[in-house]
Image (cartoon, helix red, strand yellow):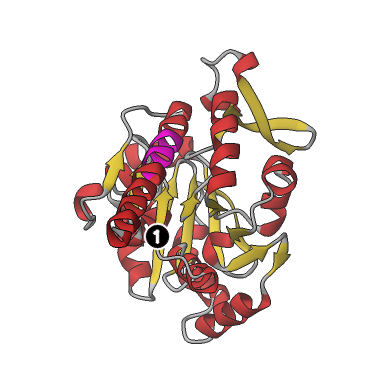
């Protein structure tokens, strides 16, 4: 069985989301400029290491390969066989880029409007005074940083409508791109670069047909939608858009929010793993009898 999980705001949380937790209960997983910037709880750490032993755990993240590999806890300690980075555009196998998947990604991108051309098409947004900066991730998608105070002022002054991001989303859909707003970050991503396709590819490589998925943003929707069992934290972009999405009955929304949602997700994954294993064992015993 596979457990494919988003990282940021699903399993790991930035320091600003950990203010109410005793530092002794936190374990740092990401360092940037010599500062601890992302954490998990120590309880989650032990559960994740156990799940990593009994299942094929696959981190699935929008982070670039460089941003992922700087998280030494995942890269050097958990050491998952596979990691899906750049929102599905790249698969790392044992820490090395899987060329066969990179070739598939490149062929997909040849059939759509390029990311570089999309930057020009979206200049009305990307060159706005409330955008601090924008970049591409490995030339696979665009991400930008919003100055939320300036955006709020523009909305108050009537320069920007309340449904601005819905308008942007509709515009990008016309070019087969999706928009995801996660706090101050806005992603503009080709539909062909998604988190499910690489998981499906890995399932075929490993001959596995059951996978659990967890994630908090619209970019996680593809893996939640196609999973055998999906888990959504009770916070974030995906939860607020669930009414507009078609989900199967096997989707669980956590009771906890924030960093404790991560612990709850792992508890449920562990429980479901053993439930399925027990059912499989009983079926084998019945067949033998």
Tell me where residue 214 appears, x and y as whole percent. Answer: 42, 47
Comparing 268 with 263, the one in front is 268
Q: Main secondary structure of the magenta part?
A: helix
Is 41 on the left-hand or right-hand side of 275?
Answer: right
Q: Secondary structure at mark 1?
A: loop
Say which residue appears at 45% left-offset and 37% top-offset: 266
Q: Is residue 212 magenta?
A: no
Q: Residue at x 38, y 68 (%)?
A: 172
Q: Residue at x 60, y 53 (%)?
A: 63
Residue 192 pos. (x, y %): 45, 74
Is residue 272 left or right of 149 when viewed as pictured? Answer: left
Kindly tell me whether residue 49 is visible in this rendering. yes
Query: Number of numbered discs present?
Result: 1
Residue, disc 1:
210
Q: Farthest residue toward the right?
A: 34
Q: Is residue 24 above or below residue 185?
A: above
Q: Residue at x 61, y 31 (%)?
A: 39
Q: Does the image show residue 237?
A: no
Q: Quadrant of residue 18?
A: top right
Relative height, residue 278 to residue 180 (above, below): above
Q: Position of residue 66 (x, y in %)?
A: 72, 55
User: Can you say whether 169 is above or below 38 in the image?
Assistant: below
In the rendered image, residue 232, in percent from the top left (x then y), is placed at 35, 43
Q: Which residues are magenta?
A: 265-272
Quarter of the figure that contains the C terminus: bottom left
Q: Is residue 60 left or right of residue 70?
A: left
In front of the other: 114 or 247: 247
Q: Residue furthest front?
A: 289
The crowding category of the residue bearing disc 1, from other C-alpha atoms within 10 Å (few below 14, some 14 to 19, many at least 20), is: few
């Amino acid at each position: 069985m596979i457990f494919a999980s988003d990282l940021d705001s699903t399993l790991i949380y930035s320091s600003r989301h950990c203010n109410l937790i005793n530092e002794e209960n936190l374990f740092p997983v990401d360092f940037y400029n010599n500062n601890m910037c992302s954490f998990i709880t120590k309880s989650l750490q032990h559960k994740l290491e156990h799940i990593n032993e009994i299942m094929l755990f696959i981190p699935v993240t929008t982070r670039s390969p460089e941003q992922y590999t700087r998280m030494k806890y995942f890269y050097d300690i958990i050491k998952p066989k596979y990691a899906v980075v750049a929102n599905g555009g790249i698969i790392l196998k044992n820490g090395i880029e899987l060329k066969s998947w990179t070739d598939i990604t490149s062929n997909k991108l040849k059939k759509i409007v390029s990311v570089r051309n999309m930057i020009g098409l979206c200049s009305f947004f990307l060159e706005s005074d409330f955008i601090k900066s924008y970049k591409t991730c490995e030339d696979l998608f665009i991400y930008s940083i919003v100055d939320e105070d300036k955006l709020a002022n523009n909305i108050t002054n009537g320069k920007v409508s309340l449904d601005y991001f819905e308008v942007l989303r509709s515009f990008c859909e016309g070019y087969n791109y999706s928009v995801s707003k996660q706090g101050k970050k806005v992603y503009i991503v080709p539909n062909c670069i998604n988190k499910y396709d690489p998981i499906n590819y890995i399932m075929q490589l490993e001959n596995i047909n059951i996978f659990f998925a967890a994630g908090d943003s619209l970019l996680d929707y593809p893996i939640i939608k196609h999973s055998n069992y999906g888990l959504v934290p009770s916070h974030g972009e995906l939860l607020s858009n669930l009414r507009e999405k078609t989900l199967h009955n096997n989707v669980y929304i956590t009771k906890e929010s924030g960093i404790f949602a991560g612990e709850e997700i792992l508890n449920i994954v562990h429980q479901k793993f053993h439930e399925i294993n027990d059912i499989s064992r009983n079926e084998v015993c019945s067949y033998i009898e």
